[in-house]
């Protein structure tokens, strides 16, 4: 049962982080270069939700396999 909870939490974090990252992508047409965009994403803590959510989801899926 805890694997399902971990999967759902990881999925939620991935969605939240991906949404924020896509929102910041709207700054590129406003004049931000791709390098500046990557530096901005690197400094924003909410953008780290996406990779951490992916890790939690993958961990849950690996544990469900066993």
Image (cartoon, rainbow, N blue to C red):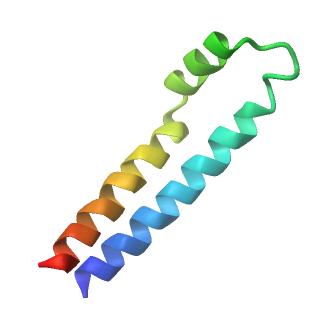
Q: Residue at x 58, y 20 (%)?
A: 38
Which residue is drawn at the image coordinates 66% and 50% (left, top)?
19
- Closest to the observer, 47 or 59: 59
Residue that extends furthest to the bottom in the rendered view of this protein: 1
14 w.r.t. 24: above or below: below
Tell me: residue 19, above or below residue 57. above
Q: Is residue 7 left or right of residue 65?
A: right
Q: Return the x and y of residue 27 as percentages of the image width and height.
A: 80, 25
Q: Is residue 50 above or below residue 36?
A: below
- Spot occupied by residue 8 in the image (x, y as percentages of width and height): 42, 74
**Can you tell which quarter of the image residue 6 is in?**
bottom left
- Quadrant where the N terminus sits is bottom left
Up the image or down, 49 lies above or below 65; here it is above
Residue extending furthest right?
30
Q: Quadrant of residue 35?
A: top right
| Outermost residue to the left | 66
Q: Nearer the viewer, residue 55 or 44?
A: 55
- Residue 41: image location, x then y, percent: 57, 27
Q: Position of residue 25 (x, y in %)?
A: 73, 32
How many numbered discs, if any? 0
Q: Quadrant of the C terminus?
A: bottom left
In the image, what residue occupies the spot 63% across and 39% down? 21
The residue furthest front is 65
């Amino acid at each position: 049962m805890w694997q399902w909870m971990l999967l759902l939490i990881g999925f939620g974090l991935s969605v939240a982080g991906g949404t924020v990252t896509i929102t910041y992508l709207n700054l590129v047409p406003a004049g931000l270069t791709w390098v500046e965009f990557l530096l901005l994403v690197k400094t924003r803590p909410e953008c780290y939700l996406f990779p951490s959510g992916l890790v939690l989801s993958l961990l849950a899926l690996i544990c469900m396999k066993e």
